[in-house]
Amino acid sequence: MSQPNIRVAIIGGGLAGATLANALIKVSHVDLDLFESAPEFTERGAAIGLTSNAQRALDQILPSMKQSLDKAGAVSMNSSRIVLGSGPDSGSLIFDLAGAGDPGIVVHRASLLREILAPLPEEILHTSKELSEIRTQGEELEIRFQDGSSKYFDAIIGADGIFSKVRNYVVGNSGEHQASPAGFWDCRHLIPLEKARSVIGDQFFELDRQYGWIGDNAFIMHDVLDNRTMVQVVVSAIEKDPPKDRKRPLTKELLTETFSNWLDGPIAKGVIDLLLEPGDLKAYSQWEQKSTPNYAKGHVCIVGDAAHATTPWQGSGAGLAIEDAVILGHLLSHIKAKDDLTAAFKAYDAVRRPRGQRVIDSSRETGRILCGQNREIGLDPDKLRELVPGRWGFIMSLDIHQHKQDALEAMQAILRTDVE
C-alpha cells in the first residue's frame, strides 16, 4: 500500500521560508503549507548580497533563477573594493576582489522575495497566521495560531526569524541559546544613484562595484542596486551600550562621535550628510545566536535566522538560508514516510549546524577587524591585505553537490542504526 503524503508546515514567509517552500513543493509526497504572521509577505531592510556559490545553491531550487534575479533588479558586482577610510593611511587601497565571470549580486530584499514567492501556488500561502503554540497530539503536531485556529501536520519547519517561536520549541527558552547583541549597530539607507554620485563622488560609481571602507570604530559600505537606479549606503559601528529595544535615533551627535577619526578622510563627511538628510533614520543593534545546541527536535526543525542568525559582516545570512533549503529539499525527497522525518532532520542538523556556527563566529570577528578593533591587525594596510581576503574562503568553497551527498549519507546511516 502506498504511504499517505507527508504534511509539512513552514512557519515564516520571509526569504528563508519562501525559498524552502520552492524546494519542498517539488517533492511529490509532501503536502505543504506556508504561514506568515503579517497581513502580507514582506521583508524588512534594504538589500542583500548573494555570492556566486549562494546563487548556485539557489539555482538548485529555482532553475529560472537568472530570470527571477533580473526581475528583482539584481545588479552584478563585478568587483568589490576595500579601502581605508580613516587614520594616517586613509584612502589606501587594501584589496580588490574581482568577480569577472563569477560575480556576486546585490538585490533588494522585498523584490527578491516577490520573485521567489511567484512560482508558489496561492492555495499554500497563508497570511495573518501568527504562531501561538506547538503541541504534540499522538503522532501529529498541532499548530495553534493567535487567531484561535489550529491545524495538524506531520512536520513543522521554523523559518520565523531571529526571535523564532519554533526555535523556542526546539532548543528551549534558556537565555544562552537566545539571540543577544553582537557588539555592533548599523543603519541602511537607499538613495537615488545621481544623489549619491553628487555627494560621495563620481569616481566611486564608475563601475558596478561594492565599496567597503575600513576605519577606526566603524565601517562604511555602498553598492548599486535596483537596475542601477539606487545606491544602498550602510554604516556599521562598534556598540558598547545596546538599547533594550534594539534601535536608537541616528543623530548628528552619534555619527560625529562614531566617525570622529574619519572626518579628514575621503568618505565619512559625504555619508554623514546623506544619512542625516531624511531626519528619521534609526541605528539598529546587530544581534546573533551565539550558541545553538540542535537545529531539530523530533519532527520539528529550524532554518535561516531561526537557526543561525548572524551578523552581516560576511554577507552570508541569505546564502546560509538557501543552503538550508537545498539540503532539506534533498533529504525530504529521499524519504517515503513520516516515520523517517526524525532521521532526515537529524542529518540536516549534522551537516548544517557546524557550518552555521562557523559563519556566526567568523562574521563577528570579521566585523571587529573591519572596525579596526583587532589588536594584532589594527589599521595596518599590509596586515589587512594579508589577512582579510582569506576570511571568505571557507564560505565560498562549499560544494553544494557534495554537501547534499554528505547529508544523504548521514540520513541513511541514521536510518540503518535505527533499524539495527
Image (cartoon, helix red, strand yellow):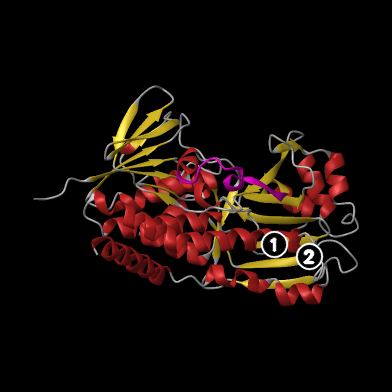
SS for tag 1?
helix
User: What residue is rendered at 63% in x and 68% in y?
Assistant: 79
Residue 409: percent from the left, percent from the top?
33, 69
- Residue 159 figure quarter: top left
Q: Residue furthest top?
A: 148
Instruction: Specify whether 201 is left or right of 11.
Output: right
Q: Which residue is mark 1?
A: 365
Residue extent of the magenta highlight:
170-183
User: What residue is rendered at 54% in x and 52% in y?
Assistant: 292
Amino acid type for the residue under numbered disc 2 = Asn
Q: Which residue is mark 2?
A: 374
**Label 1 vs 2, first from the N-terminus:** 1
Instruction: Specify whether 261 is left or right of 50.
Output: right
Q: Is residue 274 above or below residue 392?
A: above
Amino acid type for the residue under numbered disc 1 = Glu
Residue 8: percent from the left, percent from the top?
31, 43
Residue 110: percent from the left, percent from the top?
52, 43
User: What residue is rendered at 45% in x and 45% in y?
Assistant: 170
Packing grade of label 2 (10 A; few <14, some 14-19, many >=20) is some
Q: Are marks 1 and 2 in contact (CB under 8 Å)?
A: yes
